[in-house]
Image (cartoon, rainbow, N blue to C red):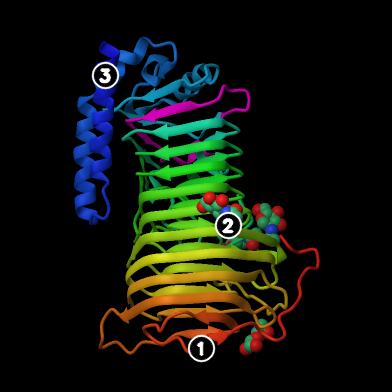
Amino acid sequence: MHTMIRFSMKNFRFVIFIAFLVWPSDNVSCIAKQHKHWRHRKASVSMLETDANSPTTFNVLRYGAKGDGIADDTKAFEEAWAAACGVEGSTVVVPSGSVFLVKPVSFSGPNCQSNIVFQLDGKIIAPKSSGAWGSGLLQWIEFTKLKGITIRGAGIIDGQGSVWWKDDNPVEESDANNSSEDSQIYADAAGGMPSTKPTALRFYGSSNVIVTGITIQNSPQTHLKFDDCTGVQVFSMSISSPGDSPNTDGIHLQNSKNVIIHSTSLACGDDCVSIQTGCSGVYIHNVRCGPGHGISIGGLGKDGTKACVSNITVRDSSLQNTMTGVRIKTWQGGSGSVQGVMFSNIQVSGVETPIMIDQYYCNGHKCQNKTSAVDVSGISYQFIKGTYTSKPVHFACSDSMACTGVTLENINLTPLQEKNQLEGPFCWHTFGELRTSTTPPITCLQRGDPSNKQVHNNGDSC
Ligand SMILES: *[C@@H]1O[C@H](CO)[C@@H](O)[C@H](O)[C@H]1NC(C)=O
Ligand SMILES: *[C@@H]1O[C@H](CO)[C@@H](O)[C@H](O)[C@H]1NC(C)=O
Ligand SMILES: *[C@@H]1O[C@H](CO)[C@@H](O)[C@H](O)[C@H]1NC(C)=O
Ligand SMILES: *[C@@H]1O[C@H](CO)[C@@H](O)[C@H](O)[C@H]1NC(C)=O
């Protein structure tokens, strides 16, 4: 009887929670709602704590965590995890009302039972002292090799990144320098922090991963990363860091398949979502991006590498004051392909360049002209609307390997301020179809296919 009441209360809370996240809502009210929600969850802590004696619930406070934001709670988290790891469907509880200082930590399978829940209602903060990071680490909190892992709750993961951001020479984007996944990001960090900046929360080699409810903020570098994961759901959560924080991607996907991201607000200093090689079956909808650099596929093919990305959908989303809107970027000299991408119903406001394909992506390096390229084909844009501040459309495709199958329909992009003298659409070696008239007219798109499109089945096909 008791249990049933608690369950219906939980459902009720869930309904309220969803109601808070109803789309769209402006930033201010969104933050206000989160605060409200935070208080709401606090009030219900005692309920969660009645679960404390359940044999499947492992509260970090019971493993000695202080939760005062000063003491090092890493060991308590590790021990709670070790206990939960042995029990199928167990829950690690990080209760609300406390702040836990946690050093770099790995919650690792592969010997764990499946379907573990990490119930995060409190706040976890990263150490600010350089000593905690040794000579530099690629991530702060890591979950690896798990079958079924859920992070949920109203809690916050705060990377306290400002101590890492004071670069003398910030690299412009996370893939600026040595882009191979998990490569080190070099910058002359001030404050004695190591030059390698960690991702705040990373999932590796896992299946059925869910991240919901939580906020990840102020990461030193990427906020949330999935590498080599299958079956990922990210929803009703938010990511937040300042627009001028260097390299702070929102969500970074690599070698991951069947990914859904929705009803999520992303504000950061780099790509809101970055889709890298090895990704397919990615569906993103009802996402808000800004500030940030937009939703991007790439940079792919750096240093002659092969990249394969396919079946990506981004729809019913909005971008505010971002550098680009929806973008595909590849380095010269790469191979492989980007195939089957749909951008649909995207609302932009004050975005520098809403639509971009750049096969000459170079990002401040000294890039030489190369003949090979990552083949870009089957890219459709429909219902892309709103305002831009620099150029509505920029398609810079490879001299040797044109972009093909680029279709555009119902594009309506206008300058943010009429008085501005702005550039018109640009296309280079871009082939496809205009399915409707567009605003502005995109006359530079070439119809059909190039006569000399290379046949590139030279072992590089994906
Ligand atoms: C990356 O760039 C930094 C300068 O920003 C340079 O010192 C470092 O050697 C570069 N690393 C690689 C691997 O290119
Ligand atoms: C990337 O960096 C790693 C080590 O930081 C280095 O071993 C590797 O050669 C670099 N790759 C390129 C292409 O610069
Ligand atoms: C493409 O991805 C979606 C998920 O976004 C998936 O449902 C669909 O089956 C995939 N299509 C193909 C042909 O793989
Ligand atoms: C690459 O090609 C462009 C145009 O074809 C040319 O303007 C540029 O100088 C070339 N760059 C190099 C480094 O050769």
Residue 80 magenta-drawn? no
Quadrant where the N terminus sits is top left
Say if residue 301 shows up in the picture.
no
Of pointers 1 and 3, the one earlier in the residue sequence: 3
The reply to whether dot 3 and dot 2 touch (C-beta < 8 Å) is: no
Mark 3 vs mark 2, foreground winner is 3
Going by the numbered disc 2, the residue's amino acid type is Gln
Left or right: where does residue 358 sit relative to residue 272?
A: right
Mark 2 vs mark 1, foreground winner is 1
- Mark 2 is surrounded, within 10 Å at the Cα level, by few (under 14), some (14 to 19) or many (20 or more) other residues, namely many
User: In the image, is residue 312 above or below residue 418?
Assistant: above
Location of residue 150 in the rendering, given as x and y in whole percent from the top left corner: 46, 33
Say if residue 318 shows up in the picture.
yes
Residue ID for mark 3: 6
Going by the numbered disc 3, the residue's amino acid type is Arg
Residue ID for mark 2: 276
Query: What secondary structure is marked by label 3?
Result: helix
Query: What secondary structure is marked by label 2?
Result: loop
Residue found at x 38% / y 36%: 125
**Closer to the camera in the image, 242 or 384:** 384
Location of residue 253 in the rendering, given as x and y in whole percent from the top left corner: 54, 51
Going by the numbered disc 1, the residue's amino acid type is Cys
Residue found at x 70% / y 62%: 305
Quadrant where the C terminus sits is bottom right
Residue ID for mark 1: 444
Location of residue 292 in the rendering, given as x and y in whole percent from the top left corner: 39, 62
